[in-house]
Amino acid sequence: MNTRFAALRHSFCLAMVLMATTAATAADKPLKVFILAGQSNMQGHAKVSTFDSLADDPKTAPLLKEMRTPDGKPRVCEKVWISSVGCLGDAYTDLTEKKGKLTVGFGASNDVKIGPEFTFGITAEKMLGEPILIIKTSWGGRSLHTDFRPPSGGPYVWSDSELNRFKQRGDDLEKIKAEKIKATGMYYRNMIDHVQKVLKDIKRVVPDYDPKQGYELAGFVWFQGFNDLVDSGVYPNQMKPGGYDLYADLLGHFIRDVRKDLSAPKMPFVIGVLGVGGVKEGNKGHTLHFRQAQAAPAALPEFQGNVKVVDTAPFWDDDLNALHERMDKLNAKLNAAFKKEPSLTREAKEAAREKAIAEDFKPEELKRYKAGVSNGGYHYLGAAKILAPIGKAFAEALVGVEPVKADGKPVKVFILAGQSNMEGHGFIRADPKQNEGKGSLERVAKDPASADKFKHLLGKDGKWAVRDDVWVHYLDRKGKLTAGFGVKDDRIGPELGFGCVIGDAYEEPVLLIKLAWGGKSLAKDFRPPSAGGEVGPFYKEIVNRTKAVLKDLKKEFPEFGDRGYELAGFGWHQGWNDRVNQAFNDEYEKNMAHFIRDIRKDLGVKNLPFVIAETGMTGPEEKHPRALSLMKAQAAVAVYAEFKGNVAFVGTREFWREKDVSPTGQGYHWNTNAETYYLIGDAMGTAMKRLLMDVK
């Protein structure tokens, strides 16, 4: 009995020590605090009902998964708390606070809207992995020139055009001036007051907060502008370059004063540039000049490296806007007609409206409109498809830019191209419904028989490891290398094995530019220029997209800084669509050689190392003449005299796994076996490494 009691007491004491250690570790890091401020678009008018519109676009579908739980309900962030003022009541003057764990309902006016805060918090939580506090202060219809005017911006100065207009109308000028003095800076003061109130008693908002850990003002996001954009009285020269210089000057003062009043002299600052109307609208008159003024402070020497600009125009959705404008025009037409028929009942009007809409809109158009739009254009259409990526971009600008250690060496860039098997169909999760999970990455990484080769893919927490030295740019997706860069985010392709081998080989950061599309042939879709005939559209895509990424490398990956890049190699895994077509098959060897020469010429790297992975699905027992001839053609190119030492062929048939040990029986996709895809990438990476040694 005494022995058992002593053991229990020892276990209890050990548990208490571990709990205390965990608590101490959590308290070691100060609480990250982010401030989000602005007017109605910072409040946010995207209804939860518009979430579904993200699902049909590959650019936004992955974000939607993070916004919802597996059962489809809006996510509640367990490590993110928020205190918000300005969104309740009339949403213009209200100072009522709403606080709690971050979820939907912290947008404007009610519990069914979101603003940028929702995906900002989700993204920041994901990137930091630690508790976060968001302090949001936003009021609709507020200007920088008056309402948010910073103290060092001085008193409001009336323009001649404003004074003349008041005189012409016979307004009481003294009364107007007195009201303006009272209003000037009111919401700047409200903003600072609320932030200081929250920081004074953080535990009131974050129940688990320990004052001993302290807090860090980790960043400020400013998203405002519409009331300044449209005010021709304050900005009479808005149609001329420099017409909004006053705004740029005031915003510079705003940044300085916020940092001073919150005692955070280098607090990172993000300016969300107003993007209503999209990129095209930004090329027009006053919109162009206003956006330039908003971005201008970031170029000041004092703000270099600590003030960033996020252009929100690229997130605008032209398709949704076109539907919205058509609906607005139709409703305006109907309302004008109804005025001429005052005897029409409400029911008759609604029936006429429904009929007109059904005649003017196709069913799929109406579905997209209803699922995507919930407000006016000046509120980004009240579209979660627009506002959600904006919030994510704000967080990435503040949190995501951790500079790579600067050693002066350029980024090593490798292109991985091909069709569906370069996209990658290897299952990650061990789904019991998919042949009991056999052949999935999870299964091979945890199975004792294969774990030694794959255990490096798992972190200490059992989750998929994320490399901090290898990045991926795959069409509209990008990030640090981990499992999930296959055709979908639940699949892998050769990039994982390739990236691990190459990442281990270099001290410099590595970037994989992955360019792959399913169902494409070399003879037609990827046809190189020197092969004659029409140049393949996807050959052009490879060249143009590669150049676009490299041209904007610092913008695409700010963490690379100014180190530059070296285009170091090209990996190719393609062939099925040529393998099943005799004519395509017959010219594959010739086309492959032309492809290598043309890629090198068009990308400007004379002997760019090139690895060809065999189209070896169905394995060593393959007997079909076309399959054999295509694989022979792929191998033959690598032994051309001109390609000796700079082109390698990788046999892949040994990586074939039968369907009884794979998730599916899709032979053309290697039975969707993740081990196969990883081994192909690993072999390609190993061959590339040898080529690079030979080139040196």
Image: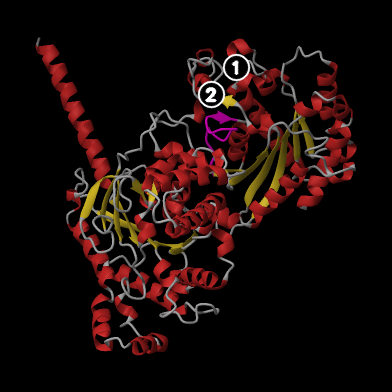
> Splitting the image into 4 quarters, where does residue 220 fall?
bottom left
Residue occupied by mark 1: 664
Q: In the visual, does 492 lie left or right of 686?
A: left
Q: Position of residue 211 (x, y in %)?
A: 18, 51
User: Is residue 398 shown in magenta?
Assistant: no
x 34%, y 79%: residue: 153
655 or 169, which lies in front? 169
Count neighbours of disc 1 (C-alpha within 10 A) and say few if under 14, some if 14 to 19, many if 20 or more. Answer: many
Image quadrant in which the C terminus is located: top right
> Splitting the image into 4 quarters, where does residue 159 fall?
bottom left
Q: Which residues are magenta?
A: 479-492
Mark positioned earlier in the residue sequence (1 or 2): 2
Q: Please say if 358 is above or below 458.
A: below
Residue occupied by mark 2: 441
517 or 638, which lies in front? 517
Q: Please say if 244 is above or below 532.
A: below
> Mark 1 is on which residue type?
Thr
243 or 656, which lies in front? 243
x 58%, y 30%: residue: 492
Count neighbours of disc 2 (C-alpha within 10 A) and say few if under 14, some if 14 to 19, many if 20 or more. Answer: many
